[in-house]
Image (cartoon, grey):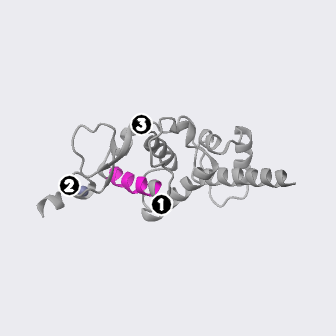
């Protein structure tokens, strides 16, 4: 009886997490990696959700994001990335120690729920944010792995930044790099 209860609870947690990922427009492959559900069950879940959903949820196909340069492409994205990375770190989505096997070790139900909480908190903080849920998954994995991106500090104010592993020059945060600031 006990085993059945546990199994039922776990199954339910998987479905709830998959739904939360679907609402954030995650790709099937990402949902499968984080929940362990089969593609077939994810498709069925999507169809049954859409049959009474209030808004259309697009299904994204193809590869998940994999370019770390995306996070440093503009000052706005750098600033958004710093906010998102702070939330990911505060909620414990990204482990304190760098782990080379992060893409294999990071996904799981508990961390998946924290990942959703972090993304939802980030969207509350920055309602016009550009960074998608799929990019959030990618950022969390890249920061945990630490091979391409890592947490850094602004060379002027010490504020948190996300930098490449071996930055070519000292990095300054959005605030310190803005022309208004340099006139002060
Ligand atoms: Zn700064």
Is residue 4 visible in the rendered structure shown here? yes
Task: Classify mark 3 as within 8 Å of ligand 1 or not, answering yes or no.
Answer: no
Q: Quadrant of the C terminus?
A: bottom left
Gap in Å between the C-alphas at discs 1 and 2?
27 Å
Callout 2 secondary element: loop
Instruction: Give the quadrant of residue 143.
Output: top left
Residue 44 % position (x, y): 74, 45
Horizontal side of 50 relative to 103 (left or right) equals right
Residue 62 % position (x, y): 55, 35
Q: Quadrant of the N terminus?
A: bottom right
Task: Determine which residue is flagged by label 1.
Answer: 123
- Mark 1 and mark 3 lie on one chain; the one further toward the N terminus is 3
Magenta region, residue range: 76-88
Task: Determine which residue is flagged by label 2.
Answer: 156
Callout 3 secondary element: loop
In the displayed structure, would residue 136 be above or below residue 62? below
């Amino acid at each position: 009886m006990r085993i059945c209860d546990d199994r039922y609870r776990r199954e339910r947690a998987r479905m709830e997490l998959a739904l939360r990922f679907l609402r954030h427009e995650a790709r099937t492959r990402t949902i499968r990696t984080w929940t362990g559900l089969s593609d077939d069950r994810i498709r069925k879940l999507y169809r049954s959700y859409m049959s009474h959903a209030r808004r259309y949820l697009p299904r994204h196909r193809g590869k998940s994001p994999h370019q770390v340069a995306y996070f440093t492409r503009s000052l706005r994205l750098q600033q958004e990335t710093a906010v998102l990375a702070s939330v990911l770190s505060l909620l414990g989505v990204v482990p304190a120690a760098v782990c080379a096997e992060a893409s294999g070790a990071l996904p799981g139900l508990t961390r998946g729920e924290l990942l959703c909480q972090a993304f939802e908190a980030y969207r509350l903080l920055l309602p016009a944010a550009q960074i998608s849920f799929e990019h959030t998954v990618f950022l969390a994995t890249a920061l945990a792995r630490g091979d391409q991106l890592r947490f850094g500090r602004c060379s002027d104010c010490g504020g948190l930044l996300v930098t490449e592993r071996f930055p070519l020059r000292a990095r300054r945060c959005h605030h310190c790099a803005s022309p208004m600031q340099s006139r002060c």
